[in-house]
Amino acid sequence: MKNDLENQTRALGRSFLYAFRGIRYCIKNERNMRIHLAAAIFVTAFSLAYRLEPLGYAVLFLAIGAVISFEAVNTALEALVNLASPAYHNLARIAKDVAAGAVFMAALAAIAAGICLFGNWSHLWETALEILTTPLLAALFGGIIAGGIWFIFYGNKLFKD
């Protein structure tokens, strides 16, 4: 009985390890994943300043999770297609294009959710003005933007091969 529990615990630990390895691969090798993550961090930080309601955070995190998940599935499908069809094939192109289109649709849905969540224009501008006129917030958001740009273009260097 004890051995069975130990084996199940090890198997569970390995499954988390494999998942983190897959996430690491996506971040290291896919610039679009880094774009999505940088945007997610910026929007999450902005949502704190905006003071979303709890239901708004639920919608925001579901939208972020959907986009990032679709990007990961797209990466997996591209790798699988490359393995199955190393030479150019029209069906391989279609599979890759459709997967990329799914990511695009999820991103559009996330943008629509963001418009609904942050669509109170007067509150949006008040929040932006608060960020711009509060030195600590301005520095924080400037750092998030600069860090996000660096992460998008150079974040793959964070990982050793």
Image (cartoon, rainbow, N blue to C red):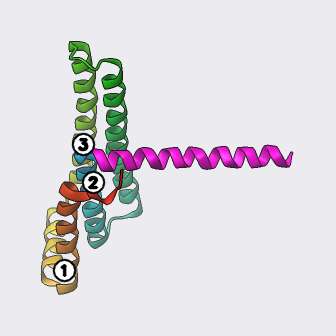
Q: Nearer the viewer, residue 124 or 85?
A: 85
Q: Residue at x 25, y 63 (%)?
A: 42
Q: Which residues are magenta?
A: 1-29
Q: Secondary structure at mark 3?
A: helix
Q: Is residue 153 magenta?
A: no
Task: For the residues labelled 2 and 3, say whether their Cβ atoms are less than 8 Å apart.
Answer: no
Q: Residue furthest right?
A: 1
Q: Which mark is residue 107?
A: 3
Q: Which residue is mark 1?
A: 139
Amino acid found under the numbered disc labelled 3: Ala
How packed mark 1 is, by other alpha carbons closer than 10 Å (few <14, some 14-19, many 20 or more), is: few
How packed mark 3 is, by other alpha carbons closer than 10 Å (few <14, some 14-19, many 20 or more), is: many
Q: Residue at x 43, y 44 (%)?
A: 22
Q: Which mark is residue 156?
A: 2
How packed mark 2 is, by other alpha carbons closer than 10 Å (few <14, some 14-19, many 20 or more), is: some
Residue 134, quarter of the rendered image: bottom left
Give the alpha-carbon distance from disc 2 to disc 3, as whole Å.
22 Å
